[in-house]
Image (spheres, coloured by chain):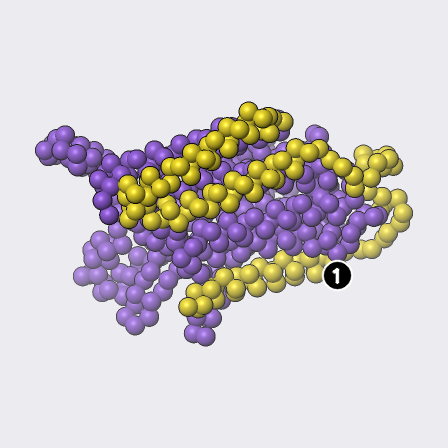
Chain colours: A yellow, B purple
């Protein structure tokens, strides 16, 4: 049962070792000559005057919320799509109200301006 | 544990080809193709004892340079997360090769060879799940760098990547409906066939029998021909996920210096750079497996090929030949898809950020929902809606 996951675990391990080895060799080979000005965050040659750790525009939060809604709803299409010919017209009419709610939600967000940038 | 050795061999094979050969060569192709399109000479300087090999030594020079550069962590950065971010970005990209079949199932007497690292029955979900972990890499790298450009770039990257993830998922639902599976190996087998382009005229009884030459017009049973709109939308979405031009808003050099990896140097930057190019190969392999028939040779199904060769050379040789041809066909299609991505990358200009988001939420999301409904209706008309 779990045997088919052997390959997935192996490739995860191999890719971790590969990426880790590249980073490790770099840390060994690279020179270390630190001084205060070099470690300043890059701000086009100026001293940074604002810290990046502050509030940013609310649009990114809205997009994240829309993503959560739509991605979870999109997940329901997957098993339905894979079994569609078995379900026939019953499956079609069972899914259409769900799709309708999705479209109504999208139209509402669109009208409210949540998709404007 | 008898699965362990084949799994390791298959993993090493696909990683050696994709990460060891394809990814370095397409960094060269990227420079050379841009040079050809812009009437320049392009990368041709790196040499070993005067031998330049058309500039093919540049990827090697890049790796050596990246490995020997100083590793700079900016003041105020979170050292642990700054270190972890490139790993989080690079590892999932390599690991997503696990479920992509680069060959079919071949029987040599007692032993069977199945050319896929992990044959999961929810294969496509594995790819989506693994690929969305890479989003964390970009978000963490921007946040941990203590730099304004990095943070802006990572915010843009996160919003763009999660938006296109929704459309990417919805654009291939039509494909699941056509092939009735989520398993990538089953999809490849289903695409190893062909259908008559005008067969529907007979099916609905509009024509009793097609005249001879019309019934000879056939198309391979590929996702590209069953779901043309799905193919265009899926390719757009995965290219936007990859954040390469024309969708390189998160790292727009003219606005954000280098976006979320502004504060990265040496191999830490190299891992971000490498993961972008490996993802080009992943995209090419995935679209090949989903839409271009995977390892299938058009109009030459596996049984026909083995059946034609085995009377002359025996079944073993025929199966071996079939396997080699299938793997070569797969990588040929992958090369074509890589070429297409490079062509798009150097042809289209970068859109504004609102245009990128509008394309996703206002154009492709409604279109992908409509695609699902239309596909459902067409399938029901053909099958008659009976199970």
> Seen in the image, is B103 located left or right of residue B354?
left
Position in image of residue B104 (x %, y %): 35, 57
Q: Residue at x 84, y 48 (%)?
A: B75
Please, is residue A61 above or below residue B47 in the view? above
- Judging from the image, what secondary structure is the residue with disc 1 in? helix
- Residue ID for mark 1: A28
Q: Is residue A50 visible?
A: yes
Q: Residue at x 22, y 53 (%)?
A: B304
Residue farthest left in this picture: B208
User: Which image quarter: residue A12?
Assistant: bottom right
> Seen in the image, is B345 located left or right of residue B268?
left
Figure disc tally: 1
> Seen in the image, is A74 located left or right of residue B250?
left
Camera-side residue: B68 or B374?
Answer: B374
Mark 1 Cα shell of 10 Å, populated few (<14), some (14-19), many (≥20): few
Camera-side residue: A5 or B361?
Answer: B361
Please, is residue B153 above or below residue B129 in the view? above
Position in image of residue B122 (x %, y %): 43, 55
Check the picture and name the quadrant holding the N terminus of chain B: bottom left
Residue farthest right in this picture: A36
Residue farthest bottom in this picture: B1
Chain identifier of the residue bearing label 1 in the image: A
Q: Residue at x 78, y 52 (%)?
A: B78
Q: Residue at x 65, y 38 (%)?
A: A61
């Amino acid at each position: 049962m779990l045997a088919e996951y052997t390959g997935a675990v192996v490739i995860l391990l191999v890719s971790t070792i590969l990426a880790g080895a590249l980073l490790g060799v770099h840390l060994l080979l690279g020179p270390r000559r630190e001084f205060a000005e070099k470690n300043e965050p890059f701000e086009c040659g100026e001293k940074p005057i604002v810290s990046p750790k502050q509030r940013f525009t609310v649009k990114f939060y809205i997009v994240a919320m829309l993503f959560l809604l739509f991605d979870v709803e999109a997940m329901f299409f997957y098993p339905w799509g894979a079994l569609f010919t078995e379900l026939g017209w019953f499956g079609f009419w069972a899914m259409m109200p769900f799709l309708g709610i999705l479209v109504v939600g999208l139209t509402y967000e669109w009208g409210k301006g949540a998709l404007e940038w | 544990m008898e699965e362990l050795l084949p799994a390791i061999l298959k993993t090493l094979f696909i990683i050696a080809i994709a990460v060891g050969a394809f990814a370095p060569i397409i960094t060269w192709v990227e420079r050379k193709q841009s040079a050809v399109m812009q009437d320049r000479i392009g990368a041709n300087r790196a040499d070993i004892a005067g031998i330049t090999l058309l500039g093919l030594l540049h990827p090697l020079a890049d790796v050596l340079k990246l490995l020997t550069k100083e590793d700079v962590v900016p003041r105020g950065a979170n050292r642990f997360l700054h270190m972890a971010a490139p790993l989080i970005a690079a590892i999932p990209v390599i690991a997503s090769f696990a479920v992509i079949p680069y060959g079919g199932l071949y029987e040599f007497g007692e032993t069977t060879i199945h050319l896929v690292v992990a044959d999961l029955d929810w294969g496509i979900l594995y790819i989506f799940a693994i690929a969305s972990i890479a989003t964390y890499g970009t978000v963490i790298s921007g946040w941990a760098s203590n730099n304004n450009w990095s943070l802006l770039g990572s915010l843009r990257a996160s919003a763009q990547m999660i938006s296109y993830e929704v459309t990417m998922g919805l654009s291939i639902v039509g494909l699941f409906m056509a092939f009735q599976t989520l398993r990538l190996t089953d999809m490849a087998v289903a695409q190893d066939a062909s259908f008559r382009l005008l067969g529907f005229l007979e099916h609905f009884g509009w024509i009793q029998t097609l005249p001879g030459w019309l019934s000879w017009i056939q198309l391979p049973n590929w996702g590209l021909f069953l779901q043309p709109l799905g193919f265009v939308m899926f390719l757009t979405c995965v290219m936007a996920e990859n954040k390469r031009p024309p969708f390189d808003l998160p790292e727009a050099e003219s606005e954000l210096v280098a976006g979320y990896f502004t504060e990265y140097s040496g191999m830490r930057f190299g891992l971000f750079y490498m993961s972008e190019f490996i993802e080009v190969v992943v995209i090419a392999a995935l679209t090949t497996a989903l839409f271009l028939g995977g390892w299938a040779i058009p109009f030459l199904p596996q049984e026909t090929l083995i059946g034609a060769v085995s009377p002359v050379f025996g079944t073993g040789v025929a199966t071996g030949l079939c396997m080699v041809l299938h793997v070569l066909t797969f990588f040929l299609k992958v090369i074509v898809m890589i070429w297409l991505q490079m062509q798009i990358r150097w042809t289209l200009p970068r859109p504004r950020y609102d245009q990128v988001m509008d394309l996703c939420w206002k154009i492709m999301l409604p279109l992908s929902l409509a695609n699902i409904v239309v596909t459902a209706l067409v399938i029901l008309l053909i099958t008659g809606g009976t199970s």
